[in-house]
Image: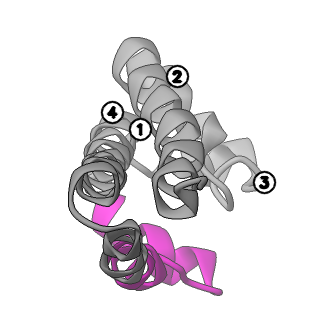
Amino acid sequence: MINVGFYACVVVFIPVFVFGVLFAVLKEKSAKLVSGFNSMPKEKQEKYDKAYIARDMRNQCFVWSAIMFAGALLSLFISKYMAIPAFVIWLILFLKQVHFDSDKAFEKYLNNNN
């Protein structure tokens, strides 16, 4: 029988981990990959610390991928239902980062000199 929990966790783990690596390798250039930031005017983007955005997104992606990797392993070795708590934890952490107002979403990344 197919272990759906394992495969579901792996399907989420792979792209999230790849994005984490992209944020780590590209550093501040990767800030353009962040939704909401890429649609800001260039003048407004200059007010924000792009390196901080990239580090924060890298860390978030690696935490999310670690949760999914743990969920995949637990689903494989303990029970296929172990994917459910992994998805719940991931969803909670993910939704904490969702903002509908870009100013509020990026306010912690404002440069101190602006």
Chief secondary structure of the magenta span?
helix
Cα distance, mark 3 to mark 2?
A: 15 Å
What element does badge 1 sit on?
helix
Residue underneath mark 4: 51
Q: Amino acid at mark 2?
A: Lys
* Residue located at (55% from left, 83% from top): 99
| Residue furthest out toward the top | 25
What element does badge 4 sit on?
helix
Quarter of the view holding residue 51: top left
Whole-percent x, y for residue 110 in the image: 34, 59
Residue underneath mark 3: 39
- Going by the image, does 79 lie left or right of 46? left
Q: Are marks 2 and 1 in contact (CB under 8 Å)?
A: yes
- Going by the image, does 84 lie left or right of 1? left
Residue underneath mark 2: 29
Q: Which mark is residue 50?
A: 1
